[in-house]
Amino acid sequence: MQYSPTESKWAELREQQLKTLAVPNTRMIVTIDLGEWNDIHPLNKKDIGIRFALAAQNIAYGDVTTVYSGPLFSSAKVLADQIEISFNNTGSGLTTKKTDELGGFEIAGPDKKFVWAKAVIKNGKVIVQSDKIQKPVYIRYAWADNPEGANLYNKEGLPASPFRINLTQ
């Protein structure tokens, strides 16, 4: 993991891909956990195919019981010095992978200087904070070319999509 949060063109590309979900009858799969650090196109095609099959089962065959996606950002609100984030597509619940500690979250105050944040899953939501940020208004998740340490999943094993939020708007 990088020593401090940075900007990322790959993260911006992922953000544009996420916007395609506004088109009716569209699905997207997340593969940030399947790729290589230096290539946006993962070599692990089998797991990608499995995720595409889940999405096809949902959209093409109308199987609404199939969990086809990992968590997608839904809404956020500031609670004093914390941000509470809600998600869609949580399946049977939010969880972490490889470690109990959530990684990949960063927050900033009005100055937009991002710092790594501590995040916990509580009551089906993610609570994010940092002792360095008293008034958080920006949050990013997995905002890197290779978002190592980003480990928010649903219990079905599908990763959360990277995102960024501006709560000043």
Image (cartoon, grey):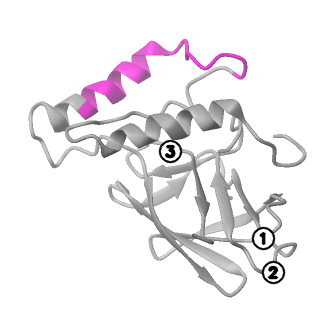
| Residue interval drawn in magenta | 37-55
Q: In the image, what residue type sits under mark 2?
A: Gln
Q: Which numbered dot is residue 109?
A: 1
Which label's residue is closer to the chain start, 3 or 1?
A: 1
Look at the numbered disc 2 and give the secondary structure of its residue: loop
Answer with left or right where residue 56 lies relative to residue 6.
left
Instruction: Tell me where residue 119 appears, x and y as whole percent.
Output: 67, 66
Mark closer to the chain start, 2 or 3: 2
Q: Pointer 1 and pointer 2: residues touching (CB < 8 Å)?
A: yes
Query: Residue 145: in sight, yes or no?
Result: no
The quarter of the picture where residue 27 lies is top left
> In the image, which disc is placed on residue 161?
3
Viewer-side label of 1, 2? 1
> In the rendered structure, which amino acid carries the disc numbered 3?
Ser
C-alpha distance separating marks 3 and 1: 23 Å
User: Closest to the observer: 100 or 36?
Assistant: 36
Q: Are marks 3 and 1 in contact (CB under 8 Å)?
A: no
- Label 2: which residue? 134
